[in-house]
């Protein structure tokens, strides 16, 4: 794998070490090349990105930084291997090139045998799994405003040392970031809304939580009308999905941490004139929001059981 | 003071011990009567509520539980003292009786000499200080939907031992509560919106943060039109307010903890058709959200300097 | 299993759900009888302790409270099943009856086929795995004073609601408890020291950490003399142990959380006249300190592979 | 003040802003020169260290890094101002030059009018205030081993971005550091023991806590004999000290955070042959362990009331 020393890269190495089929061929970490680390009880040695034997692998994961990753996964494909790109470089709304988007539950059919897959962002994963059934059934008020307030643990921001991510700055603190602007994840969400042919405005406000891992999205959605069996919408759509959990109580982050699932609840809002619902979606940003979903996609690309090597 | 052993009660005792004019006459804590505690370097002895010498004080604060407090503050008034009620019993939307509402910056004129003041809830304090200038200037889209996503530290839930508030349950966790339903604080917010004569729908979703103190409200507001100088709205309205801070960057909880302030920013949302803004408001739930504002109100009731004894 | 609703009980149910051989026959939780919970993706229903079909199981774990558990595990044995008692009731130093002590690495030979096993306390597990090689090789200064300063996450104190364990009381705090007195775990440690025939004084001071899980013991030990290869002592003794890790850098709690291991380092102290070393031992109090070790013991009792169903 | 942008520097600026006599003349922060920050409600502008008008101040605090500070405070003195050095450069055991040591309660007499004061380290402050009465009364077993296990919040390690201090690395973690080696603070402690003429060995093991601020030292001390009134030793020695609190229950960090105090308890250890006690000492590392004590020393140097401008 390329870019193995960040939080997502390390999580992926860990998952690979427990996978019944996959075997880690190499792990790059440019700055830390030569260093030995223990992952899942096995020692591995980081190599420089340039020294990665790309052609030795059947499939290569890249968790290289946004901006750098896209070039490398194209090289991987040229070497004849499949590639799963965890960066934003090839995601819808970011790239001219159209590459299969690996939000597995929604785009599964495009994945088997794909040479290149764009692994979704963490916030879009939670948000789009929550919205997809409403988009598919055309239940959202046309032209309506969908408000996505989301909060993430710090591992979503990576492990490069930045003063604002020091323990002393984050503990007992909470703040919004990227407010009102176009966050990197918004084009990705919009692209999917467009793919469903819906006409909506999205407002997305991320926040930083004083926890290590987990994302909760609190999504307010105006509907054409309130259905009788609200939860039934998601239960029907995700009836056979091993990694989507529909619950009646609001999901908690601790219910999803270290698990490759999206956990969802939906609630009608009382005392408002426009029929409106709240959808709450929780994921582990490093699992279903990054490394877990990458494995899920790789499983589908290579024709393995989709749940292979993934904790449920 | 009545009900001195909870988080708000203790904070109030602490502030009273540092106040240049006030002197604590008695402190009740029914379950812990007889116990001695040290507050602000001075020892005090809890008495039973029934043994409180209500008439000995010029002004009595009550941080008794919701439901119990209302009766007691009426007794205080009968004894000839002023009362500040920190419970929800007498707040707008909760009580038939109309009692001056102590959201000081907005209702200051009703307070001097008042015999009884209803101290606002923590969430309404942050929300209403944020919305008031928009309500006053009639800038919000009529019939519009205002979405209030808010997150609070655990001291907002009190210090009675409940399993869901144990450290082991809250650390590395985050969750919404009271979703879609009528939270205790919603009637209070609606009552103020009505008082301004505006016609709006409010959606309020509180969340529990793994921190001790602080509330951040992330408020999405559709406007009639986007003003040129967005922040100017709040700067004008709160020009002379010592306890309101208007900032250009999103406020962080650590900027307000242990201070009696509301810290606010406002941001236009890009790429949506309805002119829409995000207003972010941060407070310390135990200070401006409870004990600090109670002192602020008491200062005004008794004709002292409003900032007397309050950390800015 | 008996007593399934506490932190250790829930961890054990989780481990059982992933075990390749064991199958959970019943789970008691007296106060919560009738309640349904999901553990490891499978729903289970708590029954009252009195309704537990003790004879249906081949082996019964008890995580009932100290004081209550001892009676129940004796009943289990009368019903013809094996029992692993996670309480302190039958541990050395606590009970007149001598029951095999399940500090697996040190007492393995006594376990196969045992009808009753006393699962060790969390602090003694970390401490005794650290001290055992020194005791066995008679390296500690006779009559010497061994100082054990240890710190534990809150799950070690259980999940009954107590005011001092609320998030608001534990966050950003740290304190010692049971200082200078005979902590429940001290007799258990002393009993093992005696078993090795050594003459030592032990000082044990536990502290409460603002984290969910993990114990670090910092142990100061005066030796007869400083050996050349200090770490070699533990490497030799635990050469074939899958659950003991000897490392050269001080172990961190994050290295052991959710793993059934003891992670150890040892360091000579510079500039003191008596040859003295520091031994640092880290465990997850709910895994190697409770549920994980209980599974490990059950595996040995029933003749399964010792590592069966345990995350390394 | 010199070096105003670190945690101790900021705390000191905050305290200066509230001090009834002192007025901040300048604040340097070399890397952030030109930046404006708000401290205690007042805006200040960082200047480069070289541009500091040293001679304009009557007294200069330096919180420059260890190694750089010593040179600068000597320049301050040449300019005719008093200097308080918060770095380790001039502390006992670190410097050839003997400079008054500002552990105020123990060295008060050397401070009035001093041109240069070495402000103590945070760990030595807690430890030496705890040990001083035992040293003064010659109660410790000659040649005895004093074990100091201490734990500190992350602000003790400064606010330079280091990967190991990121929130994601520190939360839910705990570890020892500098184990067995000569920590920077050990010579400072030894120098004071020597000054009292005692012959002891000290073992010091610091740990990193997942909290922002606070230090707890757990000190094991062998005595010549156990006195009848153990706490009385400290009560007598510190009878008139406004910043030392002797308590019967173990001190908690939350009792000292944001306060310029040392809080102490002492406990006889049961069931050991050598008379042995545990002394527990808690401080806020940024207050009594750094900025607060610096103000306390400055007050004494300049002949002000020692408590001037300090929160008790």
Image (cartoon, coloured by chain):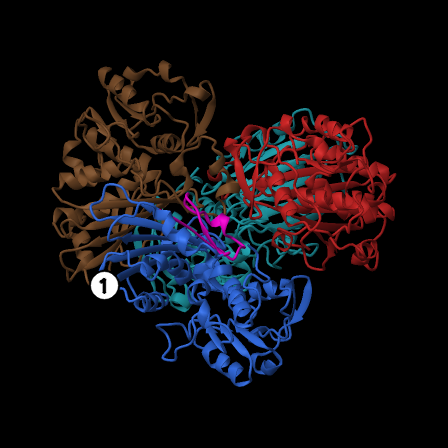
Chain colours: A cyan, B red, C brown, D blue
- State whether residue A197 is above or below residue D134: above
Image quadrant assignment for residue D102: bottom left
Q: Position of residue A87 (x, y in %)?
A: 53, 57
- Give the residues drawn in magenta, as a range: D242-266
Q: Residue at x 14, y 35 (%)?
A: C109
How many dots with numbers? 1
Residue D246 among those drawn in magenta? yes
Per the image, label 1 sits on a secondary structure element best described as: loop
- State whether residue B139 is above or below residue C49: below
Whether residue A45 is visible, yes or no, is yes
* A26 with respect to D5 (left or right): left
- State whether residue B160 is above or below residue D206: above
- Depth order, front residue of B103/D102: D102
Q: Residue at x 82, y 31 (%)?
A: B98
- Depth order, front residue of B219/A199: B219
- Depth order, front residue of B55/A282: B55
Q: Which residue is mark 1?
A: C272
* B198 with respect to A33 (left or right): right
* A7 with respect to C288 (left or right): right
Image quadrant assignment for residue A32: bottom left
Q: Position of residue B309 (x, y in %)?
A: 69, 51
Q: Residue furthest bottom?
A: D78
10 Å crowding of disc 1: few (<14), some (14-19), many (20+)? some
Residue D63 among those drawn in magenta? no
What is the chain letter for disc 1? C
Q: Position of residue D96 (x, y in %)?
A: 36, 79
């Amino acid at each position: 794998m390329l870019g193995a020393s960040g939080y997502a890269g390390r999580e992926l190495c860990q998952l690979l070490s427990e996978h019944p089929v996959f075997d880690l061929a190499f792990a790059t970490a440019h700055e830390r090349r030569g260093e030995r680390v223990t992952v899942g009880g096995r020692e591995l040695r980081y190599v420089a990105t340039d020294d990665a034997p790309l052609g030795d692998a059947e499939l290569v994961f890249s968790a290289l930084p946004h901006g750098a990753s896209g070039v490398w996964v194209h090289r991987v494909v040229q070497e004849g291997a499949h590639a799963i790109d965890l960066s934003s470089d090839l995601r819808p709304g970011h790239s001219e090139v159209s590459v299969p988007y690996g939000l597995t539950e929604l785009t599964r059919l495009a994945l088997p045998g794909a040479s290149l897959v764009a692994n979704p962002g963490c916030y879009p994963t939670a948000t789009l799994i929550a919205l997809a059934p409403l988009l598919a059934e055309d239940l959202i008020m046309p032209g309506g405003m969908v408000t996505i307030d989301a909060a993430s643990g710090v591992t979503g921001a990576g492990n490069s040392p930045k003063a604002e991510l020091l323990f002393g700055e984050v503990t007992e603190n909470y703040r919004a970031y990227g407010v009102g602007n176009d966050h990197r994840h918004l084009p990705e969400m919009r692209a999917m809304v467009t793919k469903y042919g819906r006409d909506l405005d999205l407002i997305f406000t991320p926040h930083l939580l004083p926890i290590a891992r987990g994302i909760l999205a609190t999504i307010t959605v105006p509907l054409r009308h309130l259905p009788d069996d609200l939860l039934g919408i998601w239960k029907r759509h995700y009836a056979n999905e091993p990694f989507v959990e529909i619950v009646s109580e609001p999901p908690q982050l601790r219910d999803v941490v270290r698990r490759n699932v999206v956990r969802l609840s939906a609630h009608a809002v009382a005392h408002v004139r426009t029929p409106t619902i709240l959808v709450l979606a929780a994921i582990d940003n490093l699992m279903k929001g990054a490394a877990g979903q990458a494995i899920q996609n790789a499983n589908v690309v290579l024709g393995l059981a989709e749940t292979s090597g993934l904790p449920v």
